[in-house]
Image (cartoon, rainbow, N blue to C red):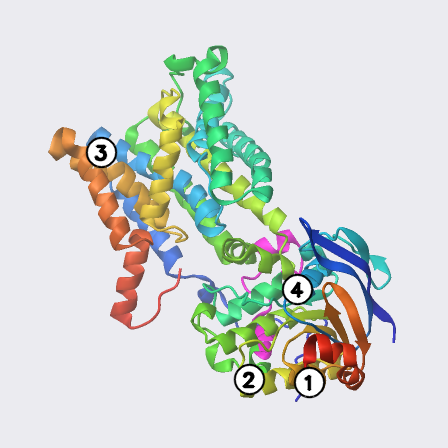
């Protein structure tokens, strides 16, 4: 019996050509982006706005999906991070006249840095204790947004937030801005797709499944915990940076604690730990209430009932349901 | 043959209970050292103190003469120290191959290269070799959570060897494993020890396994070292027979 050579440089797997690095998720993202590019045709301004809002919320949910779904860290501060990004972008573009792209980058960096700091408690406390730490942070941010009127406009908010241009083309129209949101969402989703497939993604999942064992295998659990928090928060910041010019007026209410719970619901209902789950979750959270307008004031009751039934029928969310259905069809065990 | 590990006067108390009470021993390079003792004598707590999972109340741990007391488990692992746990510790949602790639990936390149580099960190072939060596070849793409207990034990051991450690601490590797698989496991540990000079410290209750695998045995009782010697010397020690082995 000869033992495998475990010392020295690892051997490279041969034949890992480009096609094997492209999978169904990426194809779905490309197709989805192409469909959404043309989707607003005949929808009108409001329909286009709802589509754009769905994508913006999907970005925030993608970030929370990384923090919670992949790395297993329970955060109740995603809406607060989105608020930080939205207010930073609004102030930088409308008050200081900064270019939107620079404001977008600064919003991402700011929320990354704050997320990194908020990640430190996650090194010491877990599960519901961590959720309470993030809950306190969420409340703090909301109070700042509401009370520091000199900076944030308080309950009156900030208005006249400009929309960006792209190569000297103004994106003031609903359709133009929607297409811009499609491109930014696609880039951010593709970046996350790449990250989740890389060894980082494997380490994040190890963090969720068994952090003690992960550490014993050399995984720097401290570094990956902080990264999961910081990157997840930066995605909320990016979402906020798109949200502000989309609605052109922001006040503290969309960034409250209840909105963080709502984003959490979108992660779980869409399918926690599935890359496409956030799009489905945000569809349920943003578009379903629009479809339920026909039931008038009963819409929240109907919406809550649908979500409860969904989670009872499939705790892994809609993505889990699709995966189970696909596995039955093909006779194979599905994968995330 | 140098000294790889030196454990000096380790104490660990939980409230008023002294789980480990002044344990000292050394491990030579290439040695297979067994640690035996009754349940609750502090074996696993001792492992956790050595490996940074718990900080000892007192005492020191030296690796190649360097003080590593309280060093984080991930840093110790990157210095070539690996372990298995008493209870199963595989990643159930990942495939067998992914479990092994994970076990090796943090030893390759930097954080940046792990982000921008290859998805398998260049470890697929090495993982497949290890899977074949531990006779799990037919399960390479199966989710680890779906494997039998014995197969998960083999995978757990394979993961500990993936990064080519110099020192491996195995906590009850034979627990719950059937006789055939136990023979396989022993054969593989011997092969890795003989061909690569890897050093082992093994906690085990299966006396046949310990006595036939280990070159030296340390016996713990009530958090202290009761006896130390070759398997034959330990078997013949009346104190050990009285406290643990029985008549």
Q: Is residue B187 above or below residue A215?
A: below
- Tell me whether the residue at label 1 lies in contact with that at label 3, contact meaning CB atoms closer than 8 angstroms: no
Which residue is drawn at the image coordinates 52% and 80% (left, top)?
Answer: B136
Residue A119 percent coordinates (x, y):
57, 39
Residue at position x 34%, y 41% in the image: A265
Dot 4 or dot 1, earlier in sequence: 4
Q: Secondary structure at mark 3?
A: helix
Q: Nearer the viewer, residue A324 or B207?
A: B207
Asked if residue B155 lies left or right of residue B70, the reply is left
Query: How would you rate the neighbour count of disc 1 (Cα within 10 Å): few for under 14, some for 14-19, many for 20 or more?
Result: few
Tag 4: Cα neighbours inside 10 Å, few (<14), some, or many (≥20)?
Answer: many
Circle 1 SS class: loop
Up the image or down, A183 lies above or below A6; here it is above
Front label number (4 vs 1): 1
Please state which of the two labelled residues, at mark 1 or mark 2, is closer to the viewer: 1
Q: Which residues are magenta?
A: B106-130
Q: Which quarter of the picture shows residue B4?
A: bottom right
Q: CA distance from mark 4 to mark 2?
A: 23 Å
Q: Where does label 4 land, which residue?
A: B44
Asked if labels 4 and 2 share a chain, the reply is yes
Which residue matches tag 2? Answer: B181
Q: Secondary structure at mark 4?
A: helix
Spatial distance from mark 1 to mark 3, Cα to Cα? 83 Å
Q: Specify the subunit that label 2 lies on.
A: B
Q: How far apart are the alpha carbons under marks 4 and 1?
A: 25 Å
The answer for which chain carries disc 1 is B
Lower sequence index among marks 4 and 2 = 4
Q: Residues within 10 Å of mark 2 (few under 14, many from 20)?
A: some
């Amino acid at each position: 019996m000869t033992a495998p050579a475990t010392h020295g440089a690892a051997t490279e797997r041969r034949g890992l050509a480009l096609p094997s690095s492209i999978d169904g998720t990426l194809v779905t993202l490309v197709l989805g982006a192409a469909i959404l590019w043309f989707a607003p045709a005949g929808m009108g301004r409001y329909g286009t706005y709802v589509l754009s809002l769905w994508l913006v919320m999907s970005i925030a949910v993608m970030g929370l999906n990384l923090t919670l779904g992949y790395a297993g860290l329970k955060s109740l501060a995603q809406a607060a991070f989105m608020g930080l990004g939205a207010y930073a972008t609004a102030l930088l573009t409308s008050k200081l006249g900064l270019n939107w792209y620079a404001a977008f980058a600064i919003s991402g960096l700011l929320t990354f840095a704050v997320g990194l700091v908020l990640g430190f408690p996650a090194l010491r406390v877990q599960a519901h204790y961590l959720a309470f730490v993030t809950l306190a942070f969420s409340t703090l941010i909301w109070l700042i947004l509401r009370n520091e009127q000199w900076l944030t406009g308080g309950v009156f908010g900030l208005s006249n937030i400009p929309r960006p241009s792209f190569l000297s083309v103004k994106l003031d129209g609903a359709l133009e801005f929607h297409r811009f949101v499609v491109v930014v969402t696609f880039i951010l989703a593709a970046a996350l797709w790449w990250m989740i497939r890389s060894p980082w993604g494997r380490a994040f999942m190890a963090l969720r499944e068994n952090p003690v064992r992960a550490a014993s295998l050399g995984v720097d659990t401290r570094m990956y915990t902080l990264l999961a928090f910081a990157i997840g928060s930066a995605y909320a910041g990016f979402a906020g940076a798109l949200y502000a010019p989309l609605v052109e007026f922001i006040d503290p209410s969309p960034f409250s604690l209840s909105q963080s719970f709502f984003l959490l619901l979108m992660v779980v209902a869409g399918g926690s730990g599935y890359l496409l789950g956030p799009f489905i979750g945000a569809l349920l959270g943003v578009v379903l209430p629009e479809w339920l307008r026909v039931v008038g004031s009963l819409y929240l009751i109907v919406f809550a009932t649908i979500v409860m039934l969904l989670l009872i029928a499939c705790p892994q969310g809609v993505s889990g349901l699709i995966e189970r259905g696909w596995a039955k069809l093909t006779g194979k065990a599905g994968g995330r | 043959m140098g000294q790889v590990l030196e454990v000096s006067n380790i104490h660990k108390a939980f409230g008023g209970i002294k789980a480990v009470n002044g344990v000292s021993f050394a491990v030579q390079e290439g040695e297979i050292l067994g640690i035996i003792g009754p349940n609750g004598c502090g074996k696993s707590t001792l492992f956790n103190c050595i490996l940074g999972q718990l900080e000892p109340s007192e005492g020191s741990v030296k690796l190649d003469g360097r003080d590593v007391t309280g060093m984080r488990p991930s840093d110790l692992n990157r210095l070539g120290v690996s372990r298995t746990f008493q209870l199963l510790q595989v990643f159930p949602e990942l495939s067998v191959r992914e479990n092994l790639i994970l076990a090796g990936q943090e030893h390759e390149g930097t954080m940046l290269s792990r982000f921008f580099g290859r998805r398998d960190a260049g470890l697929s072939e090495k993982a497949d070799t290890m899977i074949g060596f531990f006779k799990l070849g037919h399960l390479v793409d199966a989710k680890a959570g779906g494997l039998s207990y014995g197969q998960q034990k083999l995978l757990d051991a394979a993961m500990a060897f993936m990064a080519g450690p110099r020192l491996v601490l195995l906590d009850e590797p034979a627990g719950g494993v059937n006789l055939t698989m136990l023979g396989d496991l022993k054969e593989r540990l011997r092969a890795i020890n003989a061909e690569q000079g890897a050093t082992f410290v093994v906690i085990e209750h299966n006396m046949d396994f310990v006595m036939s695998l280990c070159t030296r045995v340390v016996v713990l009782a009530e958090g202290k070292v009761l006896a130390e010697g070759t398997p034959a010397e330990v078997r013949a020690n009346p104190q050990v027979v009285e406290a643990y082995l029985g008549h």
